Amino acid sequence: MLDCFAPLAMTITLDEAVALDAVDPLRELRARFALPPGVIYLDGNSLGPLPVATPQRVAETLEAQWGGDLIASWNKHDWIGSAQRLGAKLAPLIGAKSSEVLVGDSTSVNLFKLLAAAVAARPGRSTILSEASNFPTDLYIAEGLAGLAGVTLKTVEASRIDAALDEDVAVLMLTQVDYRSGARLDLARLTATAHRVGALALWDVSHSAGAIEVDLNAAGADLAVGCGYKYLNGGPGAPGFLFVAEQLQPALASPLSGWFGHADPFAFEPEYRPAEGIARFQAGTPSIIAMAALEAGLATFDGVPMDAIEAKSRALSQAFITMVEQRCSELTLASPRDPAARGSHVVFAHRDGYALMQALIERGVIGDFRAPDLIRFGFAPLYNGFADVWRAVDALADLLDRRAFDQPRFRQRSRVT
C-alpha cells in the first residue's frame, strides 16, 4: 500500500506527478475538503482548510440543536460530553487511550493547566526546562506560570537538553516539531531521559498531530497539548486538546478548578471536588459551536491509518526538497535533510523570502513566511499530492528565474505573514 510513497531522488515531470497521485491510496481524501479552485494550499501547518462537512455540521448545531432543542441539547445531543467524546476521536491520532485526551480551551490555557499540575506534583524542584527556540507562546505561558509558582524557567539549545536535565527539573516542556525549521525532536528518548532524573515530560504536538505518526503512550509521555486548527482542520481558533497519561491522572490537580471539572457540576456545591480521570482537567463551559466544527475536522481522518499519513508526508516533503534544490539554487534548505528528523513542513531560506512568498501566493501557491528570511511549505497528506508539489516548485522556479518577486508591492509587510 505504501510503495507509491518511496522517496524521489530526481525531478519528475508533471505527467509523472499526476501518475503518482493516481496510485496514491489516500487520493480520495482530498474530496473531504472544500479547497478553492486553482489554489495549491501548502499552509495547513498554520490553518487547515475547510472540510466539506463542516458547514452542515455547524448549521445543524446552530439551527436544529440550539435553535430547535434549546437547552435540552446539553443532554439530547451530548453537548455535555463533547470534551471527552472529541478527545476519544482524537486519541488514535496521537497514540493515546480514549480516556487520556480532553478537547477544549486553547492550547495556551491547556499548557498552563498541565504545567501547573506538573510543577505541583514535583515539590522541592524549582525548574521548568525548555528549548530556547521553542514556540514563543509556550515560553510566555511557562514564564508566567513560573512567576506564580515560585519556580524558574530555564531554556537551553536543543543540543544541551540532556546535559541540563538534573534533579532540580520538575518538568521538561518541549515541542515535538519546531515551528520554524520543522526539526523533529526524539519524543521517546527525551521523555526517557527526563524520567531518569525524576522529571515529568510535557510535549506540545501542535505541529505534528494529524501530519505525522505520534505515539504518546509508546514513548511513555506524561503530558501533552496541541491545537485543533492546524492539521486537524478544526477552523480558525478551534479548541485545543490535552493529554494526561492514565496512571498520572489521580495524582495531578488542575489549577483552574472550573465547574465542568467538578465531580458533580450540576450539584452546585460550594466546595470543589475534582472529577475522576481526565474530566478533572475541564474548566469552564466549552464552546459548542467551535466543538462542532472541530468534530467535522477530526472526521476527515476517519478510516485513515497514521502510518500511511506519515509515509505520504515524508514522500511529499522529500520530493519537494529534491525538486527545489535542482531547480531553485538560490534557496537554502533550513530544515533537516533526513525525513525522520523533520515533521511535515519544509523550510527554505532566501534573502528576499517575504517578497518571494507574497509573489508565490499571488500565483495561487499558499505557503507562509517566518522572519528573518524563511519560507515555509506545509504538506498535509489528506489533501496535498505530488502534482501540487510539482506545480509549486514550477511556480517558485519561474519567479526566481524572472525575478518577478522583486516588486514594491510584494515587500509591503502585513500583520499576518
Image (tube, helix red, strand yellow):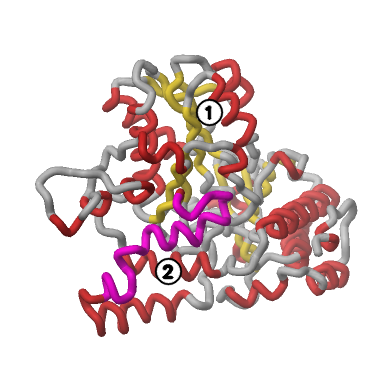
Relative to residue 73, is residue 20 drawn left or right? Answer: right
**209 relative to 333, above or below:** below
Which of the numbered marks, if any, corresponds to residue 293? Answer: 2
Residue range highlighted in magenta = 73-99
Say above or below: 292 vs 261.
below
Secondary structure character of the magenta stretch overall: helix
Mark in front: 1 vs 2: 2
Picture coordinates of residue 119, whole percent (x, y)? 37, 27
Are the two marked residues, 1 and 2, in contact with CB atoms closer than 8 angstroms? no
Magenta segment includes 84? yes
The quarter holding residue 244 reads top left
Q: According to the image, label 1 marks what residue?
A: 131
Report the residue at 57% width, 73% height from top.
Answer: 33
Q: Is residue 358 visible?
A: no
Circle 1 residues within 10 Å: few <14, some 14–19, many ≥20:
some
Mark 1: which amino acid? Glu
Residue at 80% x, 55% y is 319
Earlier-in-chain disc, 1 versus 2: 1
Quarter of the image for the N terminus: give it. bottom right
The dot on residue 63 is none
Is 138 positioned to the left or the right of 219 in the image? left
Query: Is residue 377 visible in this depiction of the protein?
Result: yes
